[in-house]
Image (cartoon, rainbow, N blue to C red):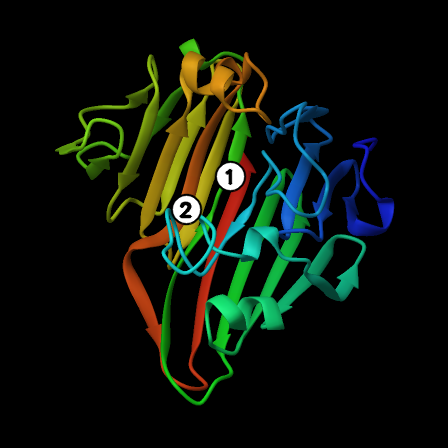
């Protein structure tokens, strides 16, 4: 996989014909290909920056300890712009680890440990998050798996499983409830609350099933034409070929007491 980044920063997973690639910067899953489809399931911008400073535009970035604008540090927190370590490795599985550093302590004065397990299965990609408070005092956080899904055509794409869900519309500044499937014909940036644990993203030619546990919210995002054009590290036509369907715990902050653990899971799977 030629991305113009240091191969030493990449972790390659393989199971049969299925493959995945993870960048240690941000624990960002860059690629997930399945043997049956022999095509890429994740969207990665052609103009994504791989300088180990700027968050990688696409794949599945890891958002922690804050979703959205943050008074203490960068938007979406520091996890997606931190270099993670490879803790354990099997051909089909990797465990990535992140702990506090001088840089994180300067903006967020707490000790922590995150273990992030990424596992390839047949036509599926599993993600398990283990967040531990290794400090002597409590702290709180929000967390999101910012999944960019590749679609063949946004005009034919629908998201099932969010019907009747209450959502916060961050573009228009209003709240509402979803009627029927989600279809996208303009810029969208919504936080759906208390969502079903199984969602289906279909583009007319294939369906990706998003499954989650312990991540009650689902963020749906597409920048549309103007948003794509204004974003320097996003292709001008990206809006036609991607939709973000992001499992997270973002509406109410999680508080962990000293030594407590938070565990959540998410999976992407091709429908048979």
- Residue located at (65% from left, 53% from top): 119
Q: Position of residue 1 (x, y in %)?
A: 82, 33
Q: Is residue 210 above or below residue 258?
A: above
Q: Which residue is mark 1?
A: 147
The count of marks equals 2
Image height of 65 relative to 145, above or below: below
As drawn, the label of residue 104 is: none
Residue closest to the eye, 18 or 58? 58
Q: Which residue is mark 2?
A: 247
Identified at 75% across, 39% down, the residue is 19
Q: Quick one: SS at disc 2?
A: strand
- The picture quadrant where one finds residue 57 is top right
**Residue 232 can be seen in this image:** yes
Disc 2: CA contacts within 10 A as few (<14), some (14-19) or many (>=20): many
Question: Residue 249 at x, y = what percent?
Answer: 35, 55
Asked if residue 87 lies left or right of residue 6, the reply is left
Q: Nearer the viewer, residue 34 or 3?
A: 3
Q: What is the crowding at mark 1: few (fewer than 14 residues within 10 Å), some, or many (at least 20)?
A: many
Q: Quadrant of the C terminus?
A: top right
Nearer-the-camera pick, 255 or 21: 255
**Which numbered disc flags the more N-terminal residue, 1 or 2?**
1
Could you tell me how far apart the alpha carbons at marks 1 and 2 are, in whole angstroms?
Answer: 8 Å
State left or right for residue 43 relative to residue 204.
Answer: right
Callout 1 touching callout 2 (CB < 8 Å): yes
Under circle 1, the secondary element is loop
* Residue 238 found in image quarter: top right
Residue situated furthest bottom in the rendering? 136
- Left or right of 243? Residue 56 is right
Q: Position of residue 221 (x, y in %)?
A: 39, 30
């Amino acid at each position: 996989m030629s991305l113009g980044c240091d191969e030493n920063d990449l972790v390659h997973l393989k199971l049969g014909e299925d493959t995945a690639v993870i960048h240690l910067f941000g624990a960002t899953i860059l690629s997930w290909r399945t043997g049956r489809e022999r095509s890429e399931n994740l969207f990665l911008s052609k103009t994504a920056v791989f300088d180990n400073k700027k968050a990688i535009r696409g794949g599945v970035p890891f958002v922690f300890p804050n979703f959205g604008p943050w008074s203490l540090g960068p938007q979406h927190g520091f996890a997606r712009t931190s270099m993670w370590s490879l803790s354990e490795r099997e051909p089909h599985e990797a465990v990535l680890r992140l702990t506090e550093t001088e840089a994180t302590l300067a903006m967020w004065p707490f000790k922590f440990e995150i273990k992030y397990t990424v596992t390839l299965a047949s036509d599926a990609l599993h993600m398990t998050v283990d967040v531990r408070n290794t400090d002597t005092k409590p702290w709180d956080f929000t967390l999101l798996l910012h999944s960019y899904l590749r679609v063949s055509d946004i005009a034919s794409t629908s998201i099932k499983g969010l019907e009747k869900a209450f959502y916060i519309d961050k573009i228009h500044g209003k709240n509402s409830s979803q009627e029927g499937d989600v279809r996208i014909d303009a810029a969208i940036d919504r936080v759906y609350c208390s969502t079903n644990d199984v969602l289906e993203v279909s583009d007319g030619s294939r369906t990706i099933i998003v499954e989650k546990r312990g991540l009650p919210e689902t963020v749906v995002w597409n920048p549309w034409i103007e948003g794509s054009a204004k974003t320097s590290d996003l292709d001008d036509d990206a809006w036609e070929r991607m939709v973000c369907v992001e499992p997270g715990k973002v509406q109410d902050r999680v508080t962990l007491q000293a030594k407590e653990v938070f565990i959540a899971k998410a999976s992407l799977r091709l429908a048979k």
